[in-house]
Amino acid sequence: MSLQRYSILVLAVVTVTLASAWPLIPSEAPVRTAMAFGAALATLNTLAAHALVDWSRGRSTKVFLGALLGGMAGRLALMLAAVTLGVLGLGLPRLPLVVSLLAYFVLFLIVELTVQHRHTAGAAETR
C-alpha cells in the first residue's frame, strides 16, 4: 500500500474514532486537547514507520534493518520528547494523553502489521 493510501486510511480512522468518542470525552479543554495530542502523536508515528518501510523496500537487508531499527529508535526518542513536551511544557493531563496515545498506537500497529503482511504475502505469491 502506498504512503498516500496508508495516510488516507490512518487519517480516516483517527477522524471517525475521535468524532465518535468526542461527545463521550469530558468537555474540559485540557482533557480533549490531551486526547487529540495523543492521537496526533500516534498518527505521525505510524506514518513515519510506514514511510521508512516503503523507502527501504527493495533495498538490501542491511539497509532495511538499519531503517527499521534506526527509525524505531529515532521515533521512540521523538515520541518521548513529544510526550514530555505535552505534559511538562503544555500542561496536558497525563492520563488522557497516555490512554489516547497507547490506544491509537496499538490500533495502528495492528493496521500496519496487517498491511505489511498483505504486501509480503502478495509478493510471495507472485514469485
Image (cartoon, helix red, strand yellow):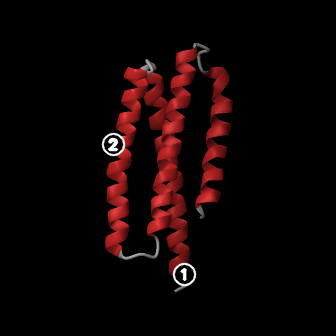
Q: Secondary structure at mark 2?
A: helix
Q: Residue at x 54, y 69 (%)?
A: 119
Q: Nearer the viewer, mark 1 or mark 2?
A: 2
Q: Amino acid at mark 2?
A: Ala
* Front in this rendered view, residue 79 or 110: 79
- Asked if disc 1 and disc 2 are in contact, CB closer than 8 Å, the reply is no
Q: Which residue is mark 1?
A: 125
Q: Is residue 106 left or right of residue 10?
A: left
Q: Position of residue 72 (x, y in %)?
A: 36, 52
Q: Is residue 14 left or right of residue 69?
A: right
Q: Which residue is mark 2?
A: 77
Q: Residue at x 50, y 65 (%)?
A: 54
Q: Is residue 19 left or right of residue 76?
A: right
Q: Position of residue 36 (x, y in %)?
A: 56, 30
> Label 1: how many residues lie within 10 Å, few (<14), some (14-19) or many (20+)?
few
**Residue occupying the far top of the picture:** 28
Q: Quadrant of residue 70?
A: bottom left
* Front in this rendered view, residue 72 or 108: 72
> As displayed, is residue 60 above or below residue 46?
below
Q: Position of residue 12 (x, y in %)?
A: 67, 45
Q: Quadrant of residue 125?
A: bottom right
> Label 2: how many residues lie within 10 Å, few (<14), some (14-19) or many (20+)?
few
